Amino acid sequence: MAVASWPAPYRFQRMSADHAPGQERSEVPEGLRHVDFSHGDVSAFPPPPEVVDAVTAALRDGGRYAYSPYRGHLFARELIAPRLSAFLGEPVDPGSEIIVTPGTQGGLFLALSSLVERGDKVAVVAPDYFANRKIVEYLEATPVPVELGYRTAAGEPALLDLEGLRAAFQSGARLLVFSNPNNPTGAVYTPGDIEAIAGLAAEFDAFVVVDQLYSRQIFDGRAFTHLRAHTRERCLTLLGPSKTESVSGCRVGVAVAPGPVVERMEQLQGIVSLRAAGYTQAALEPWFAETEGWLDQRIAAHALIRDELHEVFTGSGDVAARLTEGGSYLFLDVPAAKGRIDEFVARLRTEAAVTVTRGPEFGDFPASVRLNFSQDHQAAVDAARRIAAVAARL
């Protein structure tokens, strides 16, 4: 049998990457600046200078950085442990509770693979990061959707369906996976919901994987509640400098979890990738220790883009958008795109020189698209106006 016709294992049937963020490419009209909202623009928001210096120095140093233990360089883990302890509100042991991974995406795969058995039920928030559901299905487990009520009046918090989560646990699920701030809506979980999640996990002897990749970029002085501070032994937290800090090209992330879970992840990482790239682990050295004022300036710059895009969309009458509370995502509802989402996305590329991510990647959202607004400010605003114009023509 020819290799090209070799049948793929059935677990790959739902693993299509055709519409995954950053994958779609096509010709765009001349005369317009293409804006790719599927991921952030690191030219508009470059990494902190200290990161460039640290990685460059590591490459020049050579041997000290090239090969690390599977869970990452101990000196890097010892450096970031006190910073993570202060940030998360609970002590973090650098020897047993931290593993450095090839990006938080790699960390997510290792985490779920270390916790999920074939046939398990896994509570998955909807909408939420597209890979959560896909990895669960790849592991031959069953996702149990739990709704996040993000379509609320202005100023009202998004609330998790806690009765739905209870029902998921009652049905046999022993794991919950979600992101906070939520990807794709930018909603930040209320302290009450985080405390309730911790309480339900304890009640049903469940475990929780929380992706907090954007938890440093919170807007409007809003408080952020870390799940680990409420349930250290039942929580795995994914973090990293790839988004707010624009270090995505280094592919380095961190998982903080109880020692036995980290041990499983290390065993699997030793097979999958051996380790996160040794040289780029140096990008963790300036993490949480950037020049004073750097983070405040980055948050303020993103807030300005967020506000202007939100004004464009809500003023259009054809697009609805929740005001982002954390991160750099807007999740647009485009009623006219229902049943035509692929056409809408294609027309945005061919008529407006804009790339977005389809709502169905995040669950049953057939009339939505996601934008990453970490872009050049004026280019993003101009592109938003073109999006609204295409929505009006649908």
Image: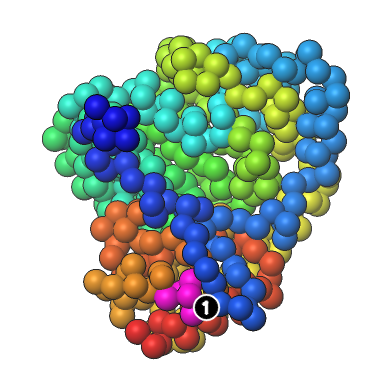
Image quadrant where residue 297 sits: bottom right
Instruction: Decide: few, some or many residues near mark 1? Use Cα within 10 Å; few <14, some 14-19, many ≥20.
Output: many
In the rendered image, residue 35, in percent from the top left (x then y), is placed at 59, 68
Q: Which residue: 80% across, 25% down? A: 58
Q: Nearer the viewer, residue 31 or 55?
A: 31
- From which residue to which does the magenta span run? 347-352
- Relative vertical location of residue 262 with respect to residue 1 in this rendering, above or below: above
Q: Nearer the viewer, residue 223 or 126?
A: 126
Q: Which residue: 72% across, 37% down? A: 288
In the rendered image, residue 249, in percent from the top left (x then y), is placed at 65, 41
Q: Nearer the viewer, residue 106 or 206?
A: 106
Relative to 183, 377 lies left or right: right
Main secondary structure of the magenta stretch: helix
Q: Nearer the viewer, residue 222 or 216?
A: 216
Rendered-image quadrant of the N terminus? top left
Rendered-image quadrant of the C terminus? bottom left
Quick one: SS at disc 1? helix
Q: Which amino acid, mark 1? A: Ala
Residue with the most extreme left position: 171
Give the tally of numbered discs. Answer: 1
Relative to 221, 27 lies left or right: left
In the rendered image, residue 319, in percent from the top left (x then y), is placed at 41, 79
In the rendered image, residue 211, in percent from the top left (x then y), is placed at 47, 40
- Relative vertical location of residue 358 with respect to residue 89 in this rendering, above or below: below
Q: Which residue: 33% across, 67% down? A: 342
- For the question of whether residue 214 can be seen, the reply is yes
Image quadrant where residue 136 sits: top left
Answer whether residue 377 is magenta in the image.
Answer: no
**Disc 1: which residue:** 352
Q: Which residue: 61% across, 47% down? A: 243
- Relative vertical location of residue 376 with respect to residue 273 in this rendering, above or below: below
